Amino acid sequence: MNFAFSEEQEFLRETARRFLEDKCPMSKVRELMESEDGFDANIWQEMAALGWVAMTIPESYGGAGFTFLETAVLLEEMGRGLLPAPFLSTVILGANTVLLAGSEEQKQAVLPSIAGGTLRLALAVTEENGRWDETGVELVARRADDGYRLSGTKSFVIDGHTADQLVVAARTEAGVTLFLVDAQAEGIERSPVQVMDQTRKLADVRFDDVVVPGDSMLGPEGDGWRTLERVFRIASVALAVESVGGAQKVLEMAVDYAKVRIQFGRPIGSFQAIKHKCADMLVGVESAKSAAYYAAWAVAEDNEEVAVVAPLAKSYCTEKFFSAASENIQIHGGIGFTWEHDAHLYFKRAKSSELLFGDPSYHRAMLADAIGI
């Protein structure tokens, strides 16, 4: 593999950074945090016009046909700017689930609309038990003359309150099965959840005997968890790369502040304790970057190593992000704890990213299983 980014990838990075700094500075992020939807529809349409939403969707379905590496470059910049947008839910989780499990008719019906920015998906898997494994899926899909009827509640659904369609994991007689459901269907009740990180909105979705036709099933009945395992590996790598962007940003914030904050007549960056903190942050960020992009390469190549490197990158990179965000607050001192300063926004995103798709301990257990320990 080539460890250097191509000219096109570097141009994509520069373009994405300029766009996000212009369209979604931290003042805009704070505004969207307070909104119910949690994202700006105009910015989403501009992202679609730039081809970001279509990046990894094949050209045969209206996409741009790039590899996951190009998407990873975007994700790093989104993490750097804490972009509030349904990118993870729609592009990473939703589109990949349809790509992996959908029929040709389902792909043709859904993916071009995602690529064009007119359709948003949300993946509804976790429930009140908070589990990210197969046994956590308890929502029931009962056979009926008109298809299936879904009953139960999904929790912590990313962008579940604003999605146009939901990919729902339900338990049938054959096991975990996926369904593509209209989010406006009768019997569905969606409610936003107040969580620590308001830059990424979550929702509870209640299904009260919701009727779905038989042709809404994604993939064979009972085969849903096998698909979700692959999707969660991709999403784990996406979250790892996003965390690298956030970690790089808080490192820069800490170093910049250490250069200008004066104590005892000298910049605090001249003190050994602060130097060591910044040096440790740098080592953590660079090692996380290596892990994240190796995992991104494995996803792009559909390499068998994904089963190993995805949980490794997710657990390591999110932990390093949280560590860097914590040290950034410490270096800033009292001001770092205030609402007005942006340090706490990165701290909250880092902690939520640690827990999303399972905490580091859960992913280390997956890694141990993958390597036969």
Image: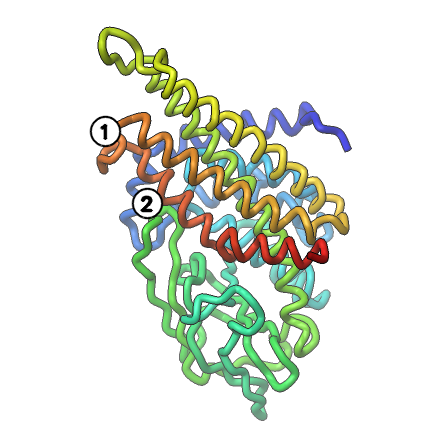
Q: What residue did someone put label 2 on? A: 32
| Left or right of residue 80, residue 271 in this image | left
Q: Work out whether residue 167 or residue 360 is closer to the camera in this orientation and state it.
A: 360
Circles 1 and 2 in contact, beta carbons < 8 Å: no
Q: Residue at x 45, y 48 (%)?
A: 353
Residue indicated by mark 1 = 335
Q: As displayed, is residue 28 above or below residue 159?
A: above
- Residue 114 percent across, percent down from the top left: 57, 54
Q: Is residue 165 or residue 328 the one in the foreground?
A: 328
Secondary element at image label 1: helix
Q: Quadrant of the C terminus?
A: bottom right
- Residue 368 visible to an observer of this rendering: yes
Give the amino acid at mark 1.
Ile
- Is 159 left, or right, of 53 in this rendering? left
Q: Nearer the viewer, residue 324 or 342?
A: 324
> Mark 1 Cα within 10 Å, few/some/many (few <14, many 20+)?
some
Amino acid on which disc 2 is placed: Leu
